[in-house]
Image: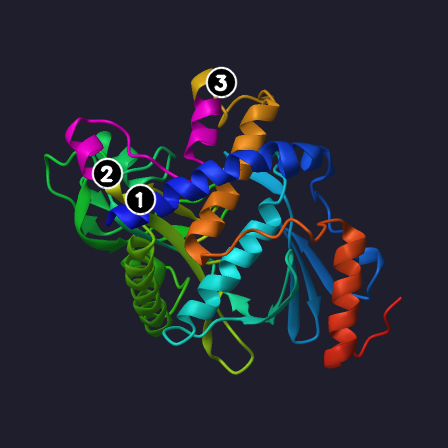
Amino acid sequence: MTQSMRDSILMIEENSKKYIDQHIEVNRLFSLVDSQLEHFYNFQNKHVGKVRDIFILNDYVIIVTTDRQSAFNRIITSIPFKGQVLNMTSKWWFDATKHLVPNHLISCPHPNVTIAKKCKIFPIEFIMRGYLTGSTDTSIWTHYKNGERIYCGHTLPDGLIKNCKLESNLLTPTTKDDHDVPISKDEIISKGIMSEKDFQICSQYAHKLFEFGVEESAKKGLILVDTKYEFGKDKFGNILLVDEIQTPDSTRFWIKNSYQDRFSKNLEPENIDKDFFRKWFLNICDPYNDAIIPHPPPEIINELSRKYIILYEIITGKNFDFSISSNSDSIKSALKDFLRKNNINPLQIV
């Protein structure tokens, strides 16, 4: 990592401090929690995920990325501008990787909205890992420190240390359930979850995307530590990358310049992700089992919003645009205009 890269990150970090007073705090109570589109269009189906509201319209999927913040298998709060950051960061990566792996993206008519090709999603999350780390029940480090040496079909040697670089990038799939469970390639195929051919294609795609992401992140002064990809089949049987790609929600990033020094001193790496948000809860409660957990204070919410925006600016090289509202009226207007211009909505618009 060159000094200019480090200086660039520091400049973005310093410049973003003013965002809290100028933009984040004033929008904290106006985050997008519900897209409310089901009362506006004659959609055939709606699915509400942890973060995204997904609507089916013939051969298209309309994905509204909200500001909902989930962790520990529950919705915890909302984070200003989060939805826009996730959606536009994904768009940047989708555009940057389409020469490597085909994806579902058609257009983003609004910073919170993606219009995509409808696909049948494989019920597996393709987790790529370059380092032995993590704090969740499913993480590779949690399993390793508990004595397990076979993880998702990979044999790990004794003597590894938390946050060390793995000998090679590992694909460590999990199921897509209420509680994700690590699973091996052999189990996926033997249980009939995916065919061997489909799994092999998705595996190759995941490795290609991760290798590209690692190289591109290094150019920005970041280490892409681990991330998850999802894939599906379109109506022609083509396997496409879907959902999101290398966003702050799906990805762990560390600061490249300080990693080796901190690792040698047994210190946690500097990060630009939501790990601090998770650790705040883990330090004061049992968020996996407690029926009610505390609501995070404003400073935690504001800081997470700022970190989302910092990462967007580092990855894309663009200043974040605060001018476009995330309210449902703004989304409805942009979506209606796009659908009419592109003549892809044969159903009546209310």
Q: Which of marks 1 and 2 is nearer the N terminus?
A: 1
Query: Which residue is most to the top?
Result: 284
Residue 285 circle label: 3
Residue under circle 2?
A: 259
Mark 1 residue element: helix
Q: Do the residues labelled 1 and 2 touch (CB within 8 Å)?
A: no
Q: Distance between the residues labelled 3 and 2?
A: 29 Å
Residue drawn at (33%, 39%) of the image: 139
Quarter occupied by the C terminus: bottom right
Which mark is nearer the camera, 1 or 3?
A: 1
Q: Residue 62 versus residue 73: which sits nearer the camera?
A: 62
Which mark is nearer the camera, 3 or 2?
A: 2
Magenta stretch in the rendered image: 260-282
Mark 2 residue element: helix
List x then y, in percent, for residue 73: 53, 37
Q: Quick check: 198 left or right of 65? A: left
Residue under circle 1?
A: 6
Mark 3 residue element: loop
